[in-house]
Amino acid sequence: MLNLLRFAEGGREQYARYAQALNETFLPRYGAEVLYAGDGSTVLVAEAGQDWDAVLLVKYPSRKAFSDMVADPEYQEVTSYRTDALQEAVLQATTEWA
């Protein structure tokens, strides 16, 4: 799952609260792992407005695992941290090349 994130003002700190819950509880519970997390840097090739504050790549064992995680009532309790933290986001499922 590719995550492209643009933070709202003060959102980086809010997102850190969400990320902590995700890493400590929900990713392990659903067999997922963060493969990469980093800050956006110099945009080399992009249209205006396609720069991002942060990029994450998370590997889930299946789409069902992701769906089960976001439906988890405990997960629902922490999603407001993410919602409040972000001005804009892209969440794109991907499939691995053979």
Image: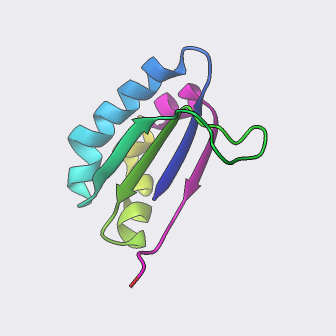
Q: Could you tell me residue 64's position as x and y percent?
A: 40, 71
Q: Residue at x 53, y 21 (%)?
A: 11
| Residue sitting at x 45%, y 59% | 1
Q: Left or right of 69: which side holds 86?
A: right
User: What is the quadrant of residue 52 in the picture?
Assistant: top right
Q: Is residue 13 magenta?
A: no
Figure coloring? rainbow
Taking the image as shown, residue 62 lies to the left or right of residue 14, namely: left
User: Relative to 43, is 28 above or below?
Assistant: below
Count of marks, rendered view: 0
Who is closer to the viewer here, 8 or 80? Answer: 8
Q: Nearer the viewer, residue 59 or 82?
A: 59
The verdict on residue 84 being magenta is yes
Location of the C terminus by quadrant is bottom left
Residue 17, above or below 28? above
- At x 47%, y 29%, the residue is 81
Q: Can you give x and y, in whole percent of width and height, for residue 37 in the image? A: 37, 41
Q: Residue furthest bottom?
A: 98
Range of residues picked out in magenta: 79-97
Residue at 23% x, 43% y is 25
User: As drawn, is 88 to the left or to the right of 68?
Assistant: right
> Image quadrant of residue 24?
top left
**Whole-percent x and y of residue 69?**
37, 56
Q: Is residue 26 left or right of residue 93?
A: left
Q: Extreme top residue here?
A: 10
Residue 61 locus on image (x, y percent): 30, 69
